[in-house]
Image (spheres, rainbow, N blue to C red):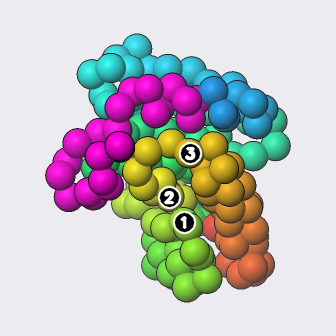
Amino acid sequence: MPTPYDPFNGSAPPLTDLDRIAEHMRFLGYTVQHDEEYDEKGGLFTASHDVNFNLTVRGFRGGILFGCVLRTTEEAKTNQHELAFLANTCNQEAVFTRFVADRDGDFVGEAFYPGPYDQQRFGAFITAFDREVATLPSRSQDLSDRMLA
């Protein structure tokens, strides 16, 4: 029986789960590249795709954290207030994704996949994450046109 998910125990998921997720992402058309320090960093890898955003994937608190950086304009880097407003607007509608405007002027989408790998659950999760990252920022069209490259 798998260990119950506990986001506060600080442990990373088994690398076998990360390996299965990497294989699933390859099936979905991602090119997966493991970091040089894969084992030491809790299973960090990157996943690039011709259509979807490129992702970083790593073990985090008993689950897996997915992240992507959306390119921003020069205006976004100097107008942090409006970039943060765009993140807050996206977060109001997001189900799976947390959007953040960092202090460097980057716009980041992150999602947490809890617990052990399950093919059906993971397939639904990654599809929903890809969809949210691709569509939510554009709902505030004026703002996203000025803030995102």
The reply to whether the C-beta atoms of the residues labelled 1 and 2 are less than 8 Å apart is: yes
Left or right: where does residue 5 sit relative to residue 73? Answer: left
Q: What stretch is highlighted in magenta?
A: 1-22
Q: How far apart are marks 1 and 2 (CA)?
A: 5 Å
Left or right: where does residue 147 sit relative to residue 110? Answer: right
Residue placed under numbered mark 2 in the picture: 111
Please tell me which of labels 3 and 2 falls first in the chain. 2
Residue type at mark 2: give it: Ala
Give the structural element (helix, strand or loop) at label 1. Answer: loop
Give how far across and how far down residue 78 sits, in percent: 49, 65
Packing grade of label 1 (10 A; few <14, some 14-19, many >=20) is: many
Residue 106 visible within the image? no
Packing grade of label 3 (10 A; few <14, some 14-19, many >=20) is: few
Please tell me which of labels 1 and 3 falls first in the chain. 1
Packing grade of label 2 (10 A; few <14, some 14-19, many >=20) is: many
State the residue at coordinates (35%, 32%).
14
Residue placed under numbered mark 1 in the picture: 97
Up-down relation of residue 125 to residue 45 (above or below): below
Q: Quadrant of residue 40?
A: top left
Up-down relation of residue 93 to residue 37 (above or below): below
Give the structural element (helix, strand or loop) at label 2. Answer: strand
